[in-house]
Image: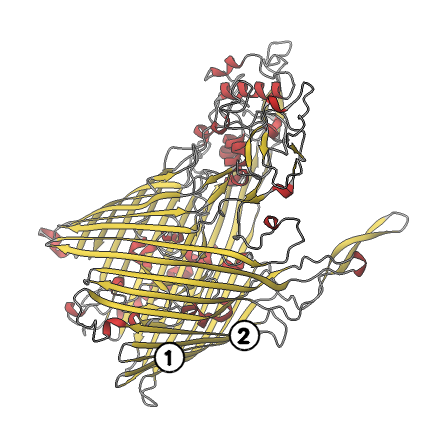
Amino acid sequence: MKKEYITLFAWIFSFCSFSVANAQTTNVISADSIKTGNINANSMVDGGLRSEKSWRNTGAVFTLSGEDLTRMTSGNLLNTLQGRIPGLTVVTGSGEPGYDNPTLYMRGQSSWNIAGNQVLIYLDGFQVDLGAISGLSAYEIESVTLLKDAAALAVYGLQGGAGVLSIRTKRGEVMPKTQITVNGKYGILSAIDLPKLMDAYGYTTAYNQALQNDGLPIKYPNPELYKAANDPFHPNVNWYDELLKKTSTIQDYNFSFRGGNKTAKYFVLMNYTNFEGLYKNADIIDKDFGTNAKYTKLNLRANIELQLNKNLAVVANISGITEDRNTPSGFAAFDVFNALLEIPAAAFPVKNPNGTWGNSSIYGPNGYNPVQLLQQNGVYSSHTRTLQTNFGFTQKLDALTKGLDLRGAVSFSNQYVGTYQKLFSVLSYEISKDANDMPVRDANGNVVYKTIGSISQSNPDGGGALWNRTAVQVGFDYDRSFGKHTFTGMVMARRQGYSHNGITYAVRTQGLSGDVTYDYDKKYIIDLTAAYNGSADFAPGHRYGFFPAAGLGWIASQEDFLKDNSVISFLKVRASYGTTGNINEAYRFLYQQFAISAPGWITGTANTTQPGRTEGRITNPDVAWEKKTTLNVGIDLKLWKKLSATVDVFSEKRTGILEIPSADVPDYTGFSLQYANTGEVSNKGFEASLNFKDKINSFEYYFGGSAAFARNKITKRSESPEPYNYLYTQGYQLGQMRGLVYKGFYQQSDFDANGNLKAGVVSSSYTNVKPGDLKFADQDGNGIINGYDKVPLNYAKLPQITLGFNLGFKFKGFDFDAYLEGVLHRTVSLLDDAYYYTHPFVNNNNITAFSANSWTPQTAGTATTPRLSTQSNANNDQVSDFWMRNGDFLKLRSVELGYTLPQKGFLKKLDAIRIFVNGTNLFTWDKIDDLEAERLSMGYPLMKAVSFGLKVKL
C-alpha cells in the first residue's frame, strides 16, 4: 500500500508539471503587471464558499498571510497559528514528533459538547479533517482566514456554529518567466522545561520521613549510601538523562515553481520534512534498527488554472501527503514520560553489575525499565497517506445577462493510516535486598536476582484510521453595477458525504446556500445571507433548517465630511445578526430506539450464561442541531495611510445544546430518557487588532498588536436539585474550576492528646485527618468538609484573553520580525494535569521539587505542601484551590533575522538569495514554579527551536 501511494503521488506530480509546462506560450506580460500577492492589500476577503471585496464585507473575519506561518519551526502547520488570529485559540498538543496536533476554539467555548466547539476546516473551498491540514507545508499556504460571525458563517448553515477556518493554497500567476523557489531550513530543538526530581539521597531520606509519619518502620537504614554515583546496589539514576538527549533536530526542504499566462497558470510544490525525537542511544543495539521517535513527511501539490476560452475556466488542485511516524514499541510517549517522572532515582540501576537489565517488580509484573524498553523492545510505525483533490469550472453567462456565472466543483479527500510493529521482549533482573537494604548473596557470594518478564517476538500490523470526504456543489454567481447601485450574489446547491472507520452510515448533509450584497455609491451596504440545509441524522420532517443572517455596512470615509480627510484614510462601521447551527456526530439517529447489550441469564444444568439485550434510550423525534444566534458590531479604520485597526464586539447565544434530562425515571418503567435540546449558553466578548507601518528613507518598520476576549456563561442546564446555588454549573463559565477553599494545614494544636480533633475544629468526611493534612473552609457551616463545600473558583483552563504583539523592520537587505503571544484569565489544576508530580510515594511514586518543603512539626509555620505519606489520602486529593495555579503565560513564539544578498556579480542571474536564522518558543514567562504553564511540563515536552535557513529565487 505504501509503495502504491508513493507511485500515485509521483505520477500526479509529474503529470501536472508536464501539463503546465506545455501550456506555456510566448504570450507574457510585463513585470510591472505582475500581481504582488500582498495579503495586506486585502482586496478580496476569502469566505470559504464565497469571496467578497474587503470594503464591501460586513462580517467579522481575519486573514493571515501564509508567509507569517513560515517564521516558526514546527512539524505541524496548525501550531504556527498560535496567537496570530484574534478570536482563534490554539491549545497546543504534545511536543512528540508527528503527534503534536493542537485543539482549535473560535471565540472560546459556547457548548459543553466537544463537537459544539469544533472549528470547521476548509481547504480551497472544501471541508477537510483537522489531520489533513496538519501535514501541509507553510510554504504552500497563501492565506488563512477565520470566519467568526453570522454574516460570514450563515452560508454554512447547520455546520457553521463553531466558526470556519478557511485555508487557501498558492495559485499560479501571470509572470514573464517561471519563478522557481527553493527553501531549506535546519532546526535544533530542545525541551522548554522538564520536571525537577529529587536525587536518590533526597528520595530515600524523604521516604523514611513519610514512613515515620505513617507510624511505620523506615525502609532505608543508611540513605548516605545513595549519594554515590556508581553503586548499582544503591543506585542514583537520573532517568531523564539516561533516556533523553539534550537536543534533537528538524529539517524542512522544499522547491516550487509558479507562473503562467492568460491561458494557463500553475503552482507546483514538493516539500520534505524530517522531525527527530529526543530519545537517547535509540540505535545502540543496531544502527539500522533505530527506535527514536521520528516523523517524516513528503508533500506534493499541483494547482492548475486553465482558461479554455474567453468564457470557460477550469481549476484543478491536487495534493498528496505521505507521513511516516516511528515511536518506540511497548510504550506510548505519555507512558514513558510518566515513568521517567514516577520511577525514583533509587529504584534500580539501568544495568546490573552482571550486565543484565535492571528492574523492579514494584512497578508491575514485568517491571518498567525505560532504557530497556527504548533500546530493545522494538519500533511501532504508522504510515499515513492523504489525498486531497478538487476540480471546478466557471462558465460566464454574459450572453444571458451580464455579470452572471455558472460555477461548479467536485472534491474528494481521503486519508488512510496503516500500522506495523516490531515487538520484542527480553528478560530483566531485580536485585534481591535484605532488611538492611543490602544485596542478598548465595552461598558462593553471588548476588541473588529475581527474573522479570519473558522472551518473545512478534510483528503485528494492521489498519488504523480511515476517512473519506466527498462534496459536489453547483450554483450561480452574479456581479453587476447599475450606476451607483451594485449587486453581487451567489446561490449554491451542495451535497457532502463523510465516512470513516467506526461508523456504519456515512454522515450526509445537503442543501442550498445563498447571499445577496447590495451597495449604494460605495457607501451603504446591505448583505443578506442564508442557508437551507439538512442532515440525514435527524427524523424525517425535522432534517432541514433555515439559517438567515443580515449584515449592514457604512463606509463613513466616503461621505463628503470625511472624503478628503488627511487623517482618516478609511472608516467602515458594520453590524451583523443571524443564526448558524452545529451537528454532532456523537449524537446521531436519536429519533430511533436501539437494542443494547445487557446482562444475560443462566440456562441448563451447566449454568451456561446467555448474552442479553435490552431496550436503549427512548426516542426523541424532535431532536435537532445546536443553534447559535450572534450579534456582531465592528469598525475598520485606517489613519494617515499607516495605522490600521479593526475592532469587533459580539454577543452569542447558543440554544438546543444536547443533554440528558436530570429527572429520575423509576426502574420499573424499563426505559432511560433520551438526549434533548434543552441546554443554553451565552458568550460575549471582543477582538481588536492594530497595525502600524511606515518608512523613513530606506528603513521600513512596523509594529502591531491584537487582543481577544470571550467569556461564556451557562444560562440553562438540566441539573439535579442542590441545597446551595453555588453547586450548580448554571450561571457559571463552561469548565469553571470548582473545589474546596484551602485554609492552611491541620496543626498539632487542632488535636487532643489522643489524636482526635478538638471540638469546634472542622472535620473531613473523606478520611481521618492528621497534622499536616490540608484544611478547608466549611462553606455551609455544618462542621464537616464534604461535596457541599466545593465552590466556583478562579477561571477555566481555556483562557478568556489572548494577546499578540508583533514588530519588525527592513533595512538595506536586513529584515527582522518578532512575535509574542500572551494568555490571561486561565487556571490550571496540578491535581488534574500533574498528579504524579505533586503526590510523592503513593503507589510507589517518586518525589519532586514540589514536595521539598513538606509539613513537619518543625516546618509547620513555613511548609508549602502536605505531610509526606506512603498512603493515599482522600482528603488531600480533593479538588481545591491549593492545587490550582495561575495559568497565564507570555511566549516569544517566533523571532527571525534575515539578510538578502545584493544582486552583484554572478548573483545577478538570481532573483534573490536570503539567509536567515529564527527561533521558536525561545522564552516563556509564567507564574508556576518549576513547571512550564502551557502543558505543565507533563508528557513529551514542548520544544523550542533555533533554525538556520536559506531561500533562493531563480
Residue drawn at point x = 42 percent, y = 38 percent:
932
Q: Amino acid at mark 2?
A: Gly
Write down the quadrant of residue 573 in the picture.
Answer: bottom left
Front-most of residues 379 and 331: 331
Front-most of residues 560 and 836: 560
Front-most of residues 170 and 549: 549
In the picture, the quarter occupied by the C terminus is bottom left
Residue 351 visible: no
* Neighbourhood count class around disc 1 (C-alpha, 10 Å): few under 14, some 14–19, many 20 upward: many
Residue drawn at point x = 67 percent, y = 38 percent:
782
Residue drawn at point x = 34 percent, y = 58 percent:
688
Establish if 807 lies above or below 559. above
Residue 300 visible: yes
Give the numbered dot on residue 545. 2
- Is the Cβ of the residue at disc 2 closer than 8 Å to that at disc 1? no
* Neighbourhood count class around disc 2 (C-alpha, 10 Å): few under 14, some 14–19, many 20 upward: some
From the viewer's perspective, tell me whether residue 78 is left or right of residue 222: left
Q: Secondary structure at mark 1?
A: strand
Q: Amino acid at mark 1?
A: Gly
Residue 606: percent from left, percent from top? 88, 47
Question: Mark 1 highlights which residue?
Answer: 489
Establish if 459 lies above or below 405. above
Q: Secondary structure at mark 2?
A: strand
Residue 790: percent from left, percent from top? 60, 42
Q: Earlier in the sequence, mark 2 or mark 1?
A: 1
Give the numbered dot on residue 742. none
Find the residue positioned furthest to the right: 605
Residue 583: percent from left, percent from top? 55, 65
- Distance from label 2 to label 1 (Cα)? 21 Å
Residue 221: percent from left, percent from top? 58, 12
